[in-house]
Amino acid sequence: MIRSLIFAALFLATLPVAVRYAHVATMLWVWLAMVAPVQYIHGFANSIPFNKLAVAIAFLALVVDR
């Protein structure tokens, strides 16, 4: 449960930076795809599709950055 809270809080903390800078969003997306930290999370955050959210944020960041 604590891992879910910590990971969700860290993910939410990086979202404003990821929206502002497209390269941060891309790095977040790649990190989530390569490391797959969701496999180590148990609790409510296990059902949240963090990788799909990172992709959506990356595309949003590309639009905002231009």
Image (tube, rainbow, N blue to C red):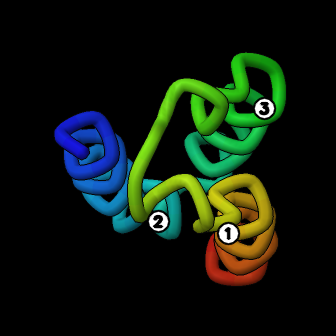
Graded by Cα atoms within 10 Å as few (under 14), some (14 to 19) or many (20 or more), the crowding at tag 2 reads some
| Element assignment for label 2 | helix
Which corner quadrant holds the C terminus?
bottom right
Numbered disc in front, either 2 or 3:
3
| Element assignment for label 3 | helix
Q: For this rendering, which residue is in front, 4 or 22?
A: 4
Q: Residue at x 45, y 42 (%)?
A: 42
Residue 17's place in the image compared with 31, above or below, is: below
Horizontal and vertical percent position of residue 50: 63, 57
Q: Residue at x 24, y 45 (%)?
A: 1
Amino acid at circle 2: Arg
Graded by Cα atoms within 10 Å as few (under 14), some (14 to 19) or many (20 or more), the crowding at tag 3 reads some
Residue bearing mark 2: 20
Residue 61's place in the image compared with 8, above or below, is: below
- Left or right: 9 in relation to 61: left
Res. 2 image quadrant: top left
Q: Residue at x 33, y 62 (%)?
A: 12
Residue bearing mark 3: 30
Label 2 and label 3: CA atoms lie apart by 17 Å
Residue bearing mark 1: 53
Label 2 and label 1: CA atoms lie apart by 15 Å
Marks 1 and 3 close (CB-CB < 8 Å): no
